[in-house]
Image (spheres, rainbow, N blue to C red):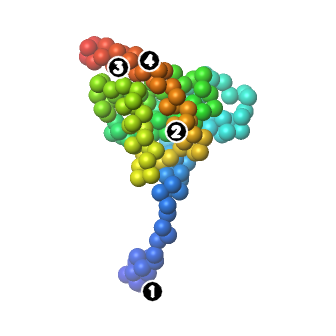
């Protein structure tokens, strides 16, 4: 059989239809385990197995290393930040104010400074949680979705407080340029 016939057979094979949730779940798994920047894989494994040796400092360090490697547009970066943040904050709510600063900054980069906690929650709803959404990096695991849908919306005051600080810090950095 010649190369042309092999190619014809290859293209005639029907591909399996993959549901949006399955596809997004697979993308999330592949992003956090990517060998180029898999700083979170070990951290997530320890979080999911409730490893008591995992310190807050290790979590923060691995998250920042991962976040520093995100190379995409601001909207996709914001989606990925919030997907990743959701899992960490579910397991370590005490780190929420530290961890979600970069997610908020990515939304500021995407939408500008004239936003509030309601806008942040709308962004997450539309870009990550709606049935049609295909967030960069895929959907978080069920616990991340639980944090985004049930826990985060109850923290509007915290979101607003940290968002105000992120916006002020961003303005200072821009003025220093």
For marks 2 and 4, the one nearer the N-term is 2
Closest to the camera, between mark 1 and mark 2, is 2
**Residue at the image position 55 percent from the left and 48 percent from the top:** 29
Image-based side of 154 in relation to 76, left or right: right
Q: Nearer the viewer, mark 3 or mark 4?
A: 4
| Disc assigned to residue 149 | 2
Q: In the figure, is residue 111 to the left or right of 24?
A: left
The residue at which mark 4 appears reads as 161
The answer to whether residue 107 is above or below residue 2 is above
Disc number placed over residue 49 in the picture, else none? none
Q: Which residue is mark 3?
A: 167
Which marked residue is nearer to the observer: mark 2 or mark 3? Answer: 2
Mark 2: few/some/many CA within 10 Å (<14, 14-19, 20+): some
Quadrant, the N terminus: bottom left
Q: Residue at x 52, y 37 (%)?
A: 148
Q: What x and y, as percent, mark residue 71?
A: 38, 38
Looking at marks 4 and 1 on the same chain, the residue that comes earlier in the sequence is marked by 1
Residue on which disc 1 sits: 1
Contact between labelled residues 1 and 3, with CB atoms less than 8 Å apart: no
């Amino acid at each position: 059989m010649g190369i042309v016939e092999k190619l014809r057979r290859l293209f005639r094979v029907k591909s399996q239809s993959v549901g949006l949730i399955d596809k997004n779940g697979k993308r999330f798994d592949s992003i956090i385990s990517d060998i180029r920047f898999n700083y979170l894989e070990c951290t997530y494994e320890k979080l999911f197995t409730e490893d008591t040796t995992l310190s807050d400092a290790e979590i923060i360090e691995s998250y920042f290393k991962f976040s520093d490697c995100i190379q995409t547009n601001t909207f996709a970066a914001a989606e990925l930040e919030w997907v990743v943040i959701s899992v960490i904050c579910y397991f370590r709510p005490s780190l929420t104010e530290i961890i979600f600063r970069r997610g908020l900054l990515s939304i500021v980069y995407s939408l500008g400074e004239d936003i509030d906690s309601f806008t942040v929650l709308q962004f997450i709803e539309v870009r990550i949680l709606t049935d049609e959404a295909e967030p960069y990096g895929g959907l978080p695991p069920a616990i991340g979705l639980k944090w985004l849908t049930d826990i985060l919306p109850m923290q509007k005051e915290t979101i607003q407080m940290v968002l105000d600080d992120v916006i002020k810090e961003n303005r200072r950095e821009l003025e220093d340029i």
